[in-house]
Amino acid sequence: METITPESHTIDDLGIDSLDFLDIVFAIDKEFGIKVPLEKWTQEVNDGKASTDDYFVMKNLCAKIDALVAAKNA
C-alpha cells in the first residue's frame, strides 16, 4: 500500500489508471455536485499547455476541486 502525500502523483506514484481515475472523478462530481473538467485538463496536457503535475499531483488536484466547489457555492 502506498503512502499518499500532498506531493503524490495519482498516476505515477499511486498507480491509478485512467479507468480508476474516471471512477474517482465520478465520485467527486457526485459528492460535491460539481463537474470536474477532465477532458479539458487532458487536452491541456496533450497540447503542452499544462503538465500532468498541474492536475494529477494530489495537492494540485485538491486545490482544483476546492476551486470548483467554491465557484459552485459562490
Image (spheres, helix red, strand yellow):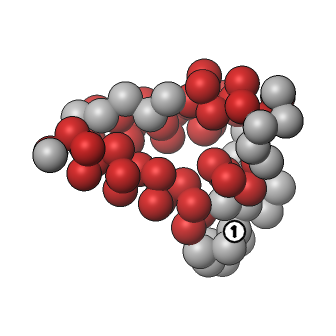
Rendering coords of residue 34 (x, y %): 30, 34
Residue placed farthest to the left in the image?
74
Residue 14 visible? no
Q: Identify the residue shown where x is 60% and y is 38%.
A: 21
Amino acid found under the numbered disc labelled 1: Ser
Rendering coords of residue 52 (x, y %): 76, 47
Based on the displayed image, in which of its 4 quarters is residue 59 positioned?
Answer: bottom right
Horizontal side, residue 4 vs residue 15: left or right: left
Count the labels in the image.
1
Rendering coords of residue 62 (x, y %): 47, 59
SS at badge 1: loop
Based on the displayed image, in which of its 4 quarters is residue 27 positioned?
Answer: top left
Horizontal side, residue 16 vs residue 47: left or right: left
60 or 49: nearer the eye?
49
Rendering coords of residue 48 (x, y %): 85, 35
28 or 67: nearer the eye?
67
Q: Identify the residue shown where x is 70% and y is 47%.
A: 16
Q: In the rendered image of this protein, does residue 1 appear above or below residue 30? A: below
Image quarter where the N terminus lies is: bottom right
Q: In the rendered image of this protein, does residue 46 appear above or below residue 64? A: above
Q: Identify the residue shown where x is 59% and y is 74%.
A: 6
Q: How crowded is mark 1: few (under 14 residues within 10 Å), some or many (20 or more)?
A: some
60 or 27: nearer the eye?
60
Where is mark 1, residue-wise? 8
Q: Identify the residue shown where x is 15% and y is 45%.
A: 73
Based on the displayed image, in which of its 4 quarters is residue 50 positioned?
Answer: top right
Horizontal side, residue 29 vs residue 13: left or right: left
Residue 64 visible? yes
Q: In the rendered image of this protein, does residue 11 appear above or below residue 44? A: below
